């Protein structure tokens, strides 16, 4: 009988990476592997990498350099690089990181678990899941429903790394979520590069609204979220699904990227600002108290000061609940990388800080309206002596209570608000459902 192999999974980047890492952990656990607290304590380490921003790619490189030193001390140590850095063409990566044992492209159809078993020279017996094996996930879990992207935004490397769009079958998704619920998950986040395009490649064709209707029936599941949305593809059927299905949260992640039509055209986003504003109006007209978040890129090639000011004006008009802002950085292989990166770094930083400051003011005003109200919170864990969780509109909420609450839906009266979080006091607990045996005790970085 083989010895237990200890593994460690290191993840950076999007929630899809986190979901893939969680699924791999489940698969390794059920064939008898054991998780290790750190990469140094493991026999096998898997890195889920990200290349959307240069800063993320640099962190992956630094982590690989650290693991190289472990490999020098322990030649049998196995390193697997997965995620978007590990594209189909691995010759350059193999030259840069000859100590990595396996590169796995996100386009690969073969199970990563099976590739790891091949790497470790383990036979087919360990590819079967032993009866009764299970792994406790968190209260909220990401579930990938759709891989790849067929669009070609000029700044984005994802289509080249994750390949064309591929949807999972509804029955397969439902079975995975039912398994998560049985082990304590109360909320799922459905993940895709463009989530509205889920099911377009299936026969018969399926829509995200139809999938949400199916998942809404799962007993024990309390909440459903989905991301990332694309303004052109967000149809009226999906608006109705969010408005009418009780488990689907009023929480929409709808990237705009820029508030200027010329910049949007150079980004090849496929819509104008007016199109985006019409969708926001439709969402707010049909869905009570919907929360909308967005992504913005500043300093895109050719973006003038006046064009950036248009983005600030759109921020004041839309008033998003959350804005994720990043400075543009060229991604080799994209169209935009062939253009002059002509906005100086200092100016990019100025624009980024301007977005952050304006959003701080807007979010503070939005959240202040919740003071004195009672909201439903799904409790995720503890931090600094307080329980924390999120409202249906995805607002982080803290409150004190002496008893264990992780995994429960509770009613919290809001007493204080900041741009980033709410503070409150427990008003009422709802009937408890089975909780996971392992819970997140601290907020992730």
Image (cartoon, rainbow, N blue to C red):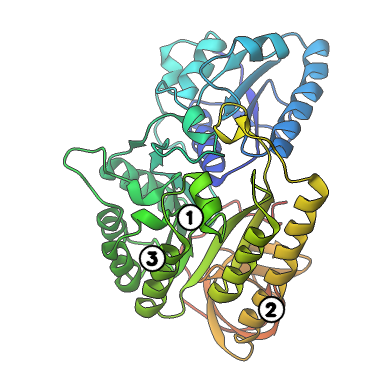
Kindly report the distance in space between the C-alpha atoms of the residues bearing marks 1 and 2.
Answer: 33 Å
Kindly report the distance in space between the C-alpha atoms of the residues bearing marks 1 and 3.
Answer: 18 Å
**Residue 360 placement (x, y as % from top left):** 71, 71
Kindly report the distance in space between the C-alpha atoms of the residues bearing marks 3 and 2.
Answer: 25 Å
Label for residue 323?
A: none
427 and 269: which is toward the camera: 269
Residue farthest to the left, as pictured: 204
**Residue 24 placement (x, y as % from top left):** 51, 32
437 and 106: which is toward the camera: 106
The residue singled out by tag 3 in the image is: 248
**Which element type, helix, strand or loop, lies under badge 1?**
loop
Q: Residues within 10 Å of mark 3 (few under 14, many from 20)?
A: many
* Quadrant containing the N terminus in the rendered view: top right
The residue singled out by tag 2 in the image is: 364
Q: Residues within 10 Å of mark 2 (few under 14, many from 20)?
A: some
Which residue is rendered at x = 54% and y = 32% of the image? Answer: 335
355 and 374: which is toward the camera: 355
Q: Are marks 1 and 3 in contact (CB under 8 Å)?
A: no
Closer mark to the observer between disc 1 and disc 2: 2
N-term-proximal mark, 1 vs 3: 1
N-term-proximal mark, 1 vs 2: 1
**Residue 421 placement (x, y as % from top left):** 68, 72
Compared with 315, 258 (above or below) is: above
Which residue is rendered at x = 74% and y = 26% of the image? Answer: 61
The residue singled out by tag 1 in the image is: 184
Asked if residue 361 lies left or right of residue 80, the reply is right
The quarter of the displayed image where residue 330 is located: top right
Total numbered circles: 3
Compared with 159, 196 (above or below) is: below
Q: Are marks 1 and 2 in contact (CB under 8 Å)?
A: no
């Amino acid at each position: 009988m083989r010895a237990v192999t200890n593994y460690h999974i290191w993840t950076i980047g999007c929630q899809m990476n986190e979901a893939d890492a969680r699924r791999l952990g489940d698969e390794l656990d059920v064939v008898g592997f054991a998780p290790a607290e750190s990469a140094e304590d493991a026999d096998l380490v898997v890195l889920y990498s990200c290349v959307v921003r240069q800063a993320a790619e640099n962190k992956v490189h630094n982590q690989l350099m650290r693991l190289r030193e472990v490999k020098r001390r322990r030649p049998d140590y196995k390193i697997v690089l997965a995620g978007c850095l590990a594209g189909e063409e691995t010759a350059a990566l193999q030259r840069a990181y000859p100590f990595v044992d396996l590169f796995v492209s996100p386009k690969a159809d073969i199970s990563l678990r099976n590739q790891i078993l091949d790497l470790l020279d383990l036979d087919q017996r360990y590819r079967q899941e032993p009866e009764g094996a299970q792994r406790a996930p968190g209260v909220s879990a990401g579930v990938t429903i759709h891989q790849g992207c067929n669009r070609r935004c000029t700044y984005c490397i994802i289509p080249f790394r994750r390949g064309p769009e591929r949807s999972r079958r509804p029955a397969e998704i439902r079975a995975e979520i039912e398994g998560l619920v049985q082990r304590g998950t109360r909320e799922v986040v459905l993940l895709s590069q463009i989530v509205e395009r889920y099911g377009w490649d299936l026969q018969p064709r399926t829509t995200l609204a139809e999938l949400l209707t199916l998942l809404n029936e799962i007993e024990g599941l309390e909440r459903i979220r989905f991301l990332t949305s694309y303004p052109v593809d967000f149809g009226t059927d999906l608006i109705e699904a969010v408005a009418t299905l009780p488990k689907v949260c009023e929480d929409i992640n709808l990237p705009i990227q820029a508030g200027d039509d010329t910049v949007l055209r150079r980004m090849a986003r496929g819509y104008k600002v007016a199109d985006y504003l019409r969708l926001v109006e439709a969402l707010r007209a049909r869905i009570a108290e919907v929360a909308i978040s967005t992504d913005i890129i500043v300093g895109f090639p050719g973006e003038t000061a006046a064009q950036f000011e248009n983005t600030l004006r759109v921020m004041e008009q839309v008033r998003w609940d959350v804005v994720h802002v990043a400075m543009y950085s060229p991604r080799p292989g994209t169209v935009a990388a062939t253009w002059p990166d002509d906005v100086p770094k200092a100016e990019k930083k100025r624009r980024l800080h301007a977005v952050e400051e304006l959003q701080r003011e807007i979010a503070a005003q939005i959240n202040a309206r919740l003071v004195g109200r009672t909201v439903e919170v799904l409790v995720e864990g503890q931090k600094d002596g307080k329980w924390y969780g999120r409202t249906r509109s995805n607002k982080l909420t803290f409150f004190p209570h002496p008893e264990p609450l992780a995994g429960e839906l509770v009613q919290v009266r809001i007493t204080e608000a900041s741009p980033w979080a709410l503070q409150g006091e427990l008003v009422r607990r709802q009937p408890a459902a089975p909780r996971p045996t392992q819970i997140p005790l601290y907020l992730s970085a």
